[in-house]
């Protein structure tokens, strides 16, 4: 088959389609979003009837994937690394239930925190759950590992994790496709009790998972994703995990490394191969994107063996992304610095778009809170978090998705009144709703601003599960109807809106204000599509 040019994320999506996927379940988050978007836009996926609607959050996505696997079909669940924290309860337990149809969990990590609140390494979760983890070094492997991982999950009866990082997810390369496999027919698990995690059954299932561990390691040696590549110079041995292998070979002409290299693409760590390398060389350098997981394993607690170099001894920086130059430095090779950035090019901090509805919402909020003083606005994660920066400087916290309302409740319970929560429409349905129920039960004197721009703006304008449902949800959770106020955030309505803000902030109970105006980016996109459709219609009428 001929090669197609794909982003790492797209290669995963195509690999899943070709492996006989029946559904992808995901919540958007950089750098994972494009996996699901590719399947949503794929004509082939549509014809195959592959389900690909966004889920409300990562936990619901994970559970839907487990449900599809239970029904015997092949499923993929995708999220960014912090999304795995949200899905963790279901994810950890899916390792105990095991699978019926293949279940691949894709977690996309963001070392250097380009668009994230931390740089946690999902491989920890894979190890924690004791399931196989795959980590590609390039786009072709992203495709191959997805194709393999879905089938392996089904064969081994356990979920498999695919871990990628930002550079690989968001860069392109030629990818060769494999033969398309059929989807599974609906079939229930042969063990009718497998998915009932009552303690007596869970203990049996857990012991089954423990029993599979040695097999997982042997499979990693057979699959070809772990390779021992010999080299003549035994003064050093290199362990290169995932994308770091690519950075390593970029430093040598024709990719020929003079030292023995253990390329790791599948976990658990292949201990026999690691032992062989340790025996063969004088010292070991470990290259891994993210946390020094393998390096720590090699060092152990006593660290009395041969020298192990990596992120823990300053051969490489402890935090942030790797790149070919950092790898070159760790090997004592010359570094190609490139050109210096000319002084006319200034750094541009991210800002809200011109005309963004959030700007008007925050200008009125700043005015409404003037008399109370600073330090009482608990925000969430979305475009509106940019209001932390100049010129608005409106918010005081941003911790995790959903934390705004519950943090405001905690602060109000400590006596910080009024406390205000600011949350986007998508984040509200993702994980704000339960916090609002807490606020109602505790009768917390807080005002919650649900900024409804009718989309998931931050991640590129996906459909928001909250669309058309916010007032009903708030009412259903027990917020008094007269304290649910909808406003249109526009400069010309500033004074009118300010009055409503002031009234509700002064109210000593739970109130909700919904500033509602569409994101200008999605509005522009919608108008463009509409105009193109109108043009098409006119042309058809003219013919
Ligand atoms: C647990 C988790 N999942 C996903 C993300 C990625 N993410 C950041 S903000 C956001 C949603 C933003 O949408 P919304 O709340 O509607 O605000 P908007 O950006 O539209 O203003 C998402 C999906 C994240 N940071 N954390
Ligand atoms: S993408 Fe939309 S919500 Fe985000 S800053 Fe721009 S206009 Fe505002």
Image (cartoon, helix red, strand yellow):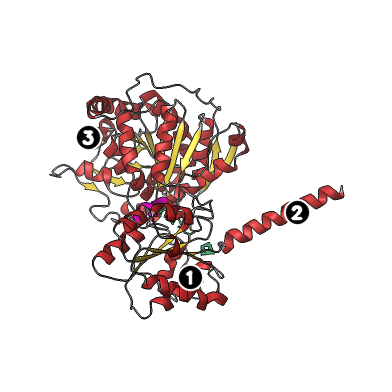
The answer to whether residue 514 is magenta is no
Q: With 191 as the anchor, is 449 left or right in this view? A: right
Magenta-colored span? 430-435
Q: Residue furthest top?
A: 190
Residue 410 against residue 27 in the figure, above or below:
below
Give the Cα separation between the discs numbered 3 and 2. Answer: 71 Å
Q: Position of residue 287 (x, y in %)?
A: 32, 47
Q: With 158 as the anchor, is 52 left or right in this view? A: right
Residue 299 against residue 16 in the figure, above or below:
below
Q: Earlier in the sequence, mark 3 or mark 2?
A: 3
Give the Cα separation between the discs numbered 3 and 1. Answer: 64 Å
Q: Magenta region, mostly helix, strand or loop?
A: helix
Q: Which residue is mark 2?
A: 534
For residue 148, which quarter of the picture?
top left
SS at badge 2: helix
Q: Earlier in the sequence, mark 3 or mark 1?
A: 3
* Residue 333 seen in render: no
Identify the residue at image location x=26%, y=24%: 208
Q: Which residue is mark 1?
A: 361
Q: Which residue is mark 3?
A: 279
């Amino acid at each position: 088959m001929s090669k197609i040019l794909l982003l790492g994320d797209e290669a995963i999506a195509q690999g899943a389609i070709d492996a006989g996927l029946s559904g992808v379940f995901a919540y958007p988050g950089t750098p994972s979003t494009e996996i699901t978007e590719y399947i949503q836009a794929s004509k082939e996926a549509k014809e195959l009837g592959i389900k690909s609607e966004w889920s409300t959050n990562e936990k619901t996505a994970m559970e839907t994937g487990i449900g599809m696997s239970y029904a015997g079909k092949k499923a993929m669940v995708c999220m960014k690394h912090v999304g795995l924290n949200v899905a963790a309860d279901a994810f950890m337990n899916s390792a105990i239930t095991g699978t019926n149809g293949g279940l691949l969990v894709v977690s996309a990590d963001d070392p250097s925190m380009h668009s994230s609140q931390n740089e946690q390494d999902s491989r920890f979760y894979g190890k924690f759950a004791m399931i196989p983890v795959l980590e590609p070094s390039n786009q072709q492997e992203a495709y191959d590992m997805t194709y393999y991982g879905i089938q392996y999950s089904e064969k081994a009866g356990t979920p498999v994790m695919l871990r990628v990082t930002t550079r690989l997810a968001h860069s392109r390369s030629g990818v060769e496709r494999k033969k398309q496999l059929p989807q599974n027919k609906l079939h229930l698990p042969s063990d009718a009790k497998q998915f009932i995690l009552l303690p007596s059954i869970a203990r049996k299932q857990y012991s089954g998972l423990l029993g599979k561990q040695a097999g997982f390691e042997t499979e990693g040696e057979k699959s070809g994703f772990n390779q021992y590549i010999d080299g003549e110079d035994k003064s050093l041995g290199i362990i290169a995990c995932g994308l770091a292998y690519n950075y390593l070979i970029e430093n040598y002409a024709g990719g020929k490394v003079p030292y023995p290299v253990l390329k790791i693409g599948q976990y658990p760590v292949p201990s026999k191969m690691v032992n062989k390398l340790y025996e063969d060389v004088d010292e070991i350098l470990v290259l891994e994107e993210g946390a020094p997981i393998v390096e720590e394993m090699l060092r152990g607690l006593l660290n009395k063996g041969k020298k192990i170099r990596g992120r823990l001894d300053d051969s490489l920086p402890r935090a942030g992304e790797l790149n070919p130059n950092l790898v070159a430095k760790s090997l004592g090779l010359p570094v190609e610095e490139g050109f210096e950035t000319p002084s006319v090019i200034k750094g541009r901090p991210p800002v809200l778009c011109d005309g963004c509805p959030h700007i008007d919402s925050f200008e009125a909020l700043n005015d409404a809170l003037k008399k109370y003083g600073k330090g009482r606005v608990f925000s969430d994660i979305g475009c509106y978090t940019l209001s932390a920066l100049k010129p608005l400087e409106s918010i005081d916290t941003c911790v995790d998705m959903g934390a705004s309302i519950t943090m405001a409740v905690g602060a109000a319970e400590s006596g910080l009144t009024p406390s205000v929560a600011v949350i986007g429409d998508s984040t509200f349905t993702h994980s704000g709703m339960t916090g609002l129920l807490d606020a109602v039960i505790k009768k917390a004197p807080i005002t919650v601003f649900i900024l409804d721009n009718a989309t998931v703006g931050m991640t590129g304008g996906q459909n928001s599960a909250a669309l058309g449902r916010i007032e009903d949800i708030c009412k259903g959770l027990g917020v008094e109807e007269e304290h649910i106020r909808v406003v249109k955030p526009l400069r010309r309505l500033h004074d009118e809106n300010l009055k409503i803000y002031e009234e509700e902030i002064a109210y000593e109970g739970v109130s909700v204000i919904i500033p509602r105006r569409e994101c200008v980016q999605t509005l522009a996109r919608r108008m463009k599509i509409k105009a193109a459709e109108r043009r098409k219609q006119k042309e058809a009428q003219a013919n």
